[in-house]
Amino acid sequence: MGNFIGHVFPGLFLVLYGLYQAIVVSKAVIFNASLLYPSCPPRNKGRWAMLWKISYVGLLKMVTGSFLIVYEINCVKGGLILMNRDMPPRFMYPKEWQHLTIFILLTLNGCVDILSKNLLPQRCVVLELGVRILTFYVLLLLLVSHTQGTVGVELQVHSLLILVVFLLMLVLTAELWAPGMFHLWLIETFLFLMMGSWLVQAGFILFKPVSSYPWQDDDMSDIMFVTTFFCWHVVINALCLLGIYGFSFFWYRCYSPSLKLTGLNEAPYHASPPGPVYKLLQEVEESEKDDQALLPTSSP
C-alpha cells in the first residue's frame, strides 16, 4: 500500500461505497423507509432468483480485500516474511504487515455481511455493526502507529486521515444504540466519502504530484496547503451528498411515483408503532373480543 496504487485503489473503493450509501440513505429519507431493511423492487422468481438476494456490498468487500491482500504480498520482493534469520532476529516489513492486517479485516467484514444477510436464518445487525466497529478500532490503532517516523507533508496527510477514521469510529459506535437513525447514517456516508477521496488525494500528494515536483517537508506553505485541500474535500463531498439527495428526490417524485407505495409498505423498522403501547392496545382488544364471545353462551 506504500505506493500510488496502494492508496488510490482503496480510496476509489471507499468512494464508490460512499456513493452507494448516499443513494440508499437518500431513498430512505425521501420515503421515510427503514435503513436497516431497505426496500427493493420485486424481482422475477426463477433459476437466478437467489442472485438478487446476495449482499453485493459484502461480496465487493471480499473481492476488494482479497485483491489487496494478493497485491500487498506480491509488492514485497522475496516474499512477505515476519522475521529474518539474523541473530537476534528482527521483525521485517512492519508497514506492510499493518496493511495486510487492514485488508484481512476488510475481507472478514465482507464475509460477515454475506453470512448475516444470506446464510443465517435471521439477519443479525448487531454482528455486522460489531465487526465493522472492530475493523475501524484496529484501523485507528494501526494508522496512529503508521505515522511513526513520518514528518512534514506525509505526517500532515496521515494526521487528517486519522481524524476522519476517529470520527467514523465514534459514529459507528453510536449506531450500536441507534442503528436506524438517519442522522448517523448520513454522517457515516459523508465520512466514508471523505476517507476515500482523501486517500486518492494522498496518493497524488505523496507519489504523483500534479506539478511533477515533490512536496517539500520543510516548506510550511506545502504543509498548510495540505490542510487547505482537505477542507476543499469537505466542501466537495458535502455538495456531492446534497446533489445526490436532490437528484434522488427529483427522480423518485417525478419519474418513479409508483415507488412511493413500495417504499412505504416495505419499511418494517419505522412502520411499527411503539412496542409497549401497541401491545397494551392488543391486549385490550383481545379481552373485549373474549367478553363478546362469552355473551351468547351465558344466555339461557
Image (tube, grey):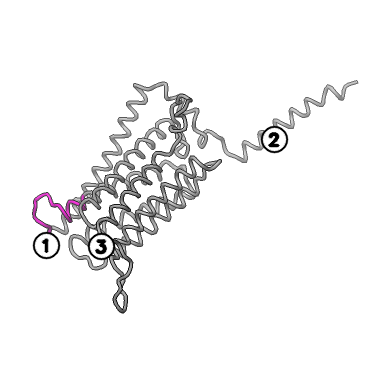
Badge 1 marks a residue whose secondary structure is loop
Q: Quadrant of residue 299?
A: top right
Q: Nearer the viewer, residue 56 or 288?
A: 56
Which marked residue is nearer to the observer: mark 2 or mark 1? 1
- Residue 71: image location, x then y, percent: 28, 52
- Numbered circle sitting on residue 78: 3
Residue type at tag 1: Asp
Q: Is residue 177 left or right of residue 246?
A: right
- Residue 75: image location, x then y, percent: 24, 56
203 is within the stretch colored magenta: yes
- Residue 5: image location, x then y, percent: 22, 50
Q: Nearer the viewer, residue 31 or 12?
A: 12
Badge 2 marks a residue whose secondary structure is helix
- Region in magenta: 201-220
Q: Mark 1 sits on what residue?
A: 219
Quadrant location of the C terminus in the rendered image? top right
Q: Is residue 119 left or right of residue 248?
A: right
Q: Residue at x 26, y 64 (%)?
A: 147
300 is within the stretch colored magenta: no
Quadrant location of the N terminus in the rendered image? bottom left
Mark before the other along the chain sequence, 3 or 1: 3
Q: Residue at x 26, y 67 (%)?
A: 148
